[in-house]
Amino acid sequence: MSHVVSAADSLSALSSRLDSAIQAVFDPMHLTGVGAYWRVVLVSLIVHVTIFKAVPIVTRLLMLRAYEQMSDGDKRSWDICVLALLHSAFDAAFIIAYFNNPALNGDKMGGYNEQFEYLLATTLGYYVWDLSICLSDYSNYGLMYLIHGGLGVFGLIVLTSRQLQFYAIPYLLPELSSVFLNIRHLLKYAGKANSLVYKVNFLLFLVAFISIRVGFETYHSFYLALDVYQGNTGNVFYPFAVYFAILGVTLTALNLIWLRQILNAAYYTLFAGASKRTKEAQARKDE
């Protein structure tokens, strides 16, 4: 028993020293969340890795034939999409729960909610995992995905440091549209790209993308940029306010670029197939 107690004491002492070392590095950088939540992030990362490893096992139990017919690349993409779907659903759920939180809405720069901060630290574990995927498979993902993953990790580190927590809402609520996007990918891998479910899901994705990403996110990005320009940043570390303002403008530009691509995809998904069948039917009738 004494050996167990001694080991526990040693582990506790090591953890305390690690706390001190992390805080000494990040606290002067106004990133106190790293020291406060590194254990939460680590546990979250382990959970996400475990789920990722379990996805192929569960998929084989539920749909062995369809899964085995996929190429190795599609299997890996399927596994990633399943975890991304679970993550986006989790993010969207807790963001919606805090949508009208008085503490956050009352002070968009310095509003603080401890439980909300804890949930943000939990979701940071996913973004660390996502960044590791981009690094390990860089040839497939490329620089843009790597930058996107890095920006997400840094942004959440700032949000867990009692700064700009409100802006987790407009910047993470778009995960709701990602729910439908990931379902779309999964249906495609499962060979259901021509099904009614696929088309209905794509329509829901289109509505969510336009209303949330192009509408809600753009609206708050504009007013954040305006506040930063006017110096209305309260007690927030000013460079981080600037960072989030630039991030919002960048996301708005990307969303508008993606919207054009999505509208083109919407035409082929919702209308082109029906138009093709009509022409084929007319051709048979003429014969």
Image (cartoon, grey):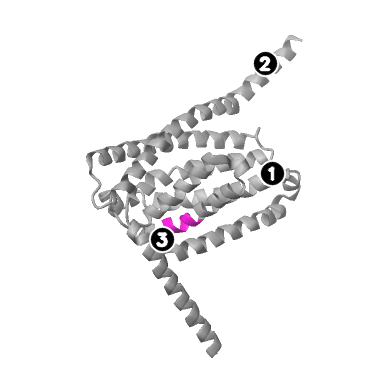
Compute the Cα span from label 2 to label 1. Answer: 35 Å
Compute the Cα span from label 3 to label 2. Answer: 60 Å
Q: Residue at x 47, y 75 (%)?
A: 14
The quadrant of the rendering that contains the C terminus is: top right
Q: What label does residue 219 carry, if any? A: none
Going from the N terminus, do you reach mark 3 or mark 2 first?
3
Q: Would residue 232 appear left or right of 166 to someone viewing this image?
A: left
Location of residue 254 in the rendering, given as x and y in whole percent from the top left corner: 45, 34
**Tag 3 secondary structure:** helix
Would residue 100 be counted in the magenta stretch?
A: no
Give whichever of 178, 46 is nearer the camera. Answer: 46
Compute the Cα span from label 1 to label 3. Answer: 35 Å
Circles 3 and 2, Cβ within 8 Å, touching? The answer is no
Disc 3: CA contacts within 10 A as few (<14), some (14-19) or many (>=20): many
Going from the N terminus, do you reach mark 2 or mark 1 first?
1
Circles 2 and 1, Cβ within 8 Å, touching? The answer is no
Q: How many marks?
A: 3
* Residue carrying label 3: 34
Read off the magenta span. 119-125
Tell us which disc is closer to us: 3 or 2.
3
* Residue carrying label 1: 73
Disc 2: CA contacts within 10 A as few (<14), some (14-19) or many (>=20): few
Q: Residue at x 41, y 54 (%)?
A: 157
Location of residue 91 in the rendering, given as x and y in whole percent from the top left corner: 46, 51
Q: Amino acid at mark 3?
A: Val
Location of residue 25 in the rendering, given as x and y in whole percent from the top left corner: 39, 62
Q: Residue at x 75, y 47 (%)?
A: 68
Q: Would residue 249 appear left or right of 127 to someone viewing this image?
A: left
Tell me the quarter of the picture where residue 183 sits.
Answer: top right
Location of residue 235 in the rendering, given as x and y in whole percent from the top left corner: 24, 53
